[in-house]
Image (cartoon, rainbow, N blue to C red):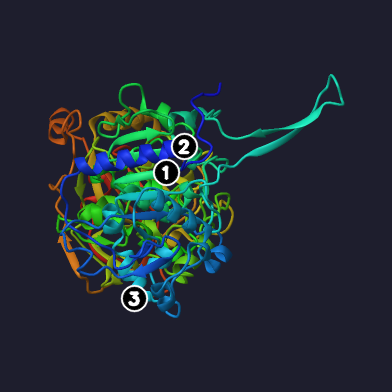
Amino acid sequence: MASRESSPQEHPLCDRNVEKLRAFIRDTEARAKPRPAFCPTRLIRIGDDKGKEDICYLVIPGPDLLRDKRPLRYAALSYCWGPLEDAKAQFKTERASLPDRVSGFRPEETSPVMRDAVEVCRALDIRYLWVDAVCIVQDDRVDWERESAEMTNIYRGACLTICTPTSTSCREGFLERRVLTVNFRSKIDRSVVGSYTIRSCGAISDPRVARGVYGELDRVDTSPLSNWWKRGWTYQELRLSRRVLLFGNKLLVDFENRVWSENDEEMIEVVTGEVSAEGREDRARGAFAGISLTGQFDLGDDWMSTVEEYSARQLTFETDKLPAMAGLARMEVQGGGELYLAGIRRKSVHRDVFWTPEPRTGVAGDGDARVSFDSLIKSLNSPQPYVAPSWSWARWRGKVRFDESPAPYGDHVPVRDGDACFARAYERIDVWTSASESNPFGQVTGGSLKITSTVVPMLPRLQRQEGFDNHWEMYEGNGYVANISFDWDEPEGWVPYERLSLVLIGSYWNWSTYRIAKLNQDAEEEQDDDDTGDEADRDGEADVDMIWGEGGDDDDEDSSSESDISFEAALNRDEDADKFAYGLVVHPAEAEGRYFRVGVFTSWPKGRGGLKRFFQGRDARTIEII
């Protein structure tokens, strides 16, 4: 059944809407706490000092614009560049055209999406506008890297971010309310003919849209959301913005946890991102928005969820994978003396490297493509282009998950939540990436993870889990050892399993899960010797200098909440109690002595698996994963 609400106005910038928006901006700015003055390197000034509004200038704000020590009021535009041909043809600034932009240009010369943004600024008395295509010199790599590193400040410093879900390209505006004309002929009197003109009236048939559950929709190809919701760059632009004016089927305002939907009388408060009072989601219907991401920004333990959501987004250039979320990364690690290494947080490296590709997201980013072992190794040995090291989620072209099960029936590693106590299980780890000095959170040209830990060759007996093409169980004789998830999912083709190895990264403990393992242990140890499997062997070691290192500490547990019973308490009840072990699956690279990450494993304390039963007591060795 469709959900119903009030209709939008004939034009988004009608007098009623503009009056409301101006009042909201005044009220929000009056409530705002003082913040440090920030001004982008360049801004588009709308109009001149003589009152002419039909001309724009690219300006470099000087001391005269900041003389009152208050932040300069400007709006930022968040939009889709569109297909490559549209992006190439759009109005932009390059080194050759920079003088022309400074000397002045008319709005009608610009791309339609920018033209509409200028109209919005005029209506709301905002004199300055930031648009990436014009305010960044597009063919100057140094300028591009420097400015892309400022996205946090640019979007958080804007008095307003104009978001454009109804525009799929820079060549499409967002202010025109689209209508549909339907011809008809009467079935009663065939001479009666005419037409209906239809436009959106706020009725949404999909209950997920009505509830604002857009994360679910983004995961399916039939999503009704526009391209703006699916693009990589727009993800952080929305997340970083303090105040959003979103042009969807209806106008939606999200100003620092207060929201308004077109034709509502007043804004409503949203407490800590939750729906309050009568249900904020009702007022978000039809506006293509329903999630409060502005205002209080604190990724905290939600970094992994942020990466999961972002990794599902699309990018025209794969090399933008890290730059397009550099602003979010800066917010995550700033102030804590933290290092950020190609999408991996230094202090959480033992958890952040444990990611898995979502099924059927391929090397080429095709949601239906399967990835073979050969294509995976080829893409790692000769990446075109290079995006990130093999151990970083950023190198995968498609959606990734943390807390994902290498065993599809619940045998997962809860790295994303606080349900388990985690400990590092390596002796030492050193991580290095090469990033630009102007943007350490952006694109990298190389990286290495050198680890001293237990490295175990893949055992000969592997059994594929029924119904899954990349989930396996490894056995030693008849005894279970580990669940394995490979980064490829093409079941056909030869795979040299004997060249694969397991690298121990960490351990975790959860009493409830341990009890499940104990219940299943006897049954699994009685499995038939004749289960199908493939053989495996062992290889490799390496050495390289690093810029960051730390020693492993099995007592350094980073749990956010304790399990039902601590491991020590469990030992008092069961002297055979053991921790869960997890880590990476690696394969030799063409570069001698180096390896690629090609999967993950988790070893339950059942059968012959677990930290103590299978891994402890073995000699450690040092390998380099690139």
- How many numbered callouts? 3
Label 1, on which residue?
Answer: 246
Of residues 134 and 216, the one nearer the viewer is 134
Whole-number angstrom distance, CA of label 3 to CA of label 2? 38 Å
Q: In this image, 98 relative to 419: left or right?
A: right
**Location of residue 515 by image quarter:** top left
Local SS, label 3: helix
- Which tag, 1 or 3, sits closer to the chain's start? 3
Q: Is residue 190 left or right of residue 3?
A: right
Out of 459 and 402, give the one closest to the viewer.
402
Does dot 1 land on a helix, a strand or a loop?
A: strand
**Can residue 476 be seen in the rendering of this structure?**
no
Q: Nearer the viewer, mark 3 or mark 2?
A: 2
Q: Nearer the viewer, residue 385 or 131?
A: 131
- Image location (x, y in percent) of residue 520: 36, 30
Few, some or many residues within 10 Å of mark 3 (<14, 14–19, 20+): some
In the image, what residue occupies the spot 51% across and 49% down? 174
Label 2 vs label 1: CA separation?
Answer: 8 Å
Residue at mark 1 to residue at mark 3: CA–CA distance: 32 Å
Q: Are marks 2 and 1 in contact (CB under 8 Å)?
A: yes
Q: Amino acid at mark 1?
A: Leu
Q: Is residue 169 left or right of residue 48?
A: right
Amino acid tagged 2: Ala
Classify mark 2: helix, strand or loop.
loop
Query: What residue is pinned by disc 3?
Result: 142
Left or right: 418, with 34 as reference point: right
Q: Quick one: which residue is furthest to the top in this view?
A: 188
- Residue type pointed to by label 3: Val
